[in-house]
Amino acid sequence: MQHATFEITGMSCGHCVKAVDKALQQTSGVTVEAVAIGTATVAFDPAQTTPAQIAQAIDDAGYAVVATR
């Protein structure tokens, strides 16, 4: 497993946190470690997904990833 932290814009409340968490939970190969306003940290299986695919799941939920660490 590898780890990544995503900096996210557009999150402003608990509903936003839940929406991002749900999107990440539905992404194959991803284990959510923490989601807070402005960030999400995950563990992921690189055989199943990539940071770009994870960022796309966040984008599809209506938020924008501005940086990945």
Image (tube, grey):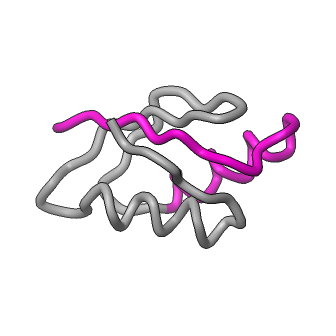
Percent coordinates x, y for residue 33 in the rendering: 45, 28
> Per the image, is 4 magenta?
yes
User: Is residue 26 or residue 61 the one in the foreground?
Assistant: 61
> Per the image, is 29 magenta?
no
Percent coordinates x, y for residue 28 in the rendering: 36, 62
Quarter of the picture containing the C terminus is top left
Percent coordinates x, y for residue 35 in the rendering: 60, 32
Q: Give, as a single range, the part of the protein colored magenta.
A: 1-26
Q: Left or right of 58: which side holds 61?
A: right
- Residue 47's image quarter? bottom left
Percent coordinates x, y for residue 65 in the rendering: 53, 53
Note whether 53 is above or below 38 in the view shown.
Answer: below
For the point 73% across and 40% down, the residue is 17
- Residue 21's image quarter? top right
Quarter of the picture containing the N terminus is top left
Note whether 50 is above or below 45 in the view shown.
Answer: below
